[in-house]
Amino acid sequence: MWDLIKLQMRTAHMLAEAQTVIGMRMLGMAGVLPATKGENLRMVTEKQSAFVDAGRAATMAMMAGATPVAVYSAALAPIGRTTRANSRRLTRARR
């Protein structure tokens, strides 16, 4: 049960970071905040990589006989790393 609660908290944290990234990028596109060159291309290509990595991790976990919570956790890890890195990078540039 605690594994599921921890997974829900990790998911909520990832979603909050994703909203921060979306907001910062929208403000950059609107010209309110300075945006780095290539940010629009980056926001498309990084999703492809993160989702491929997530699918690969989930597949490997399933093939190893992992529990559903462990499979979801494996899939969440690459997506969470991407949102965390973007959130830190975009908010650090604004400080």
Image: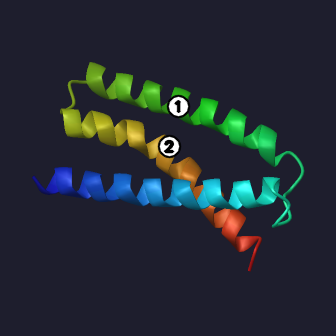
Side (left or right) of 17 relative to 58: right
User: Residue 36 or 33: which is nearer the viewer?
Assistant: 33
Side (left or right) of 31 relative to 16: right
Residue type at the position of mark 2: Ile
Q: Residues within 10 Å of mark 2 (few under 14, many from 20)?
A: many
Pinpoint residue 11: horizontal percent, then vertical percent: 36, 52
Residue type at the position of mark 1: Phe
Q: Which residue is mark 1?
A: 51
Say which element carries label 2: helix
Q: Are marks 2 and 1 in contact (CB under 8 Å)?
A: yes
**Residue at the (39%, 36%) spot, across then down:** 75
User: Residue 9 or 22: which is nearer the viewer?
Assistant: 22
**Residue at the (52%, 59%) spot, across then down:** 17
In the image, farthest residue toward the right? 37
Pinpoint residue 63: horizontal percent, then vertical percent: 29, 19
Q: Is residue 87 above or below residue 11?
A: below
Side (left or right) of 7 relative to 24: left
**Residue at the (40%, 42%) spot, across then down:** 76
Q: Which residue is mark 2?
A: 79
* Distance of label 2 from label 1 (alpha carbons): 7 Å
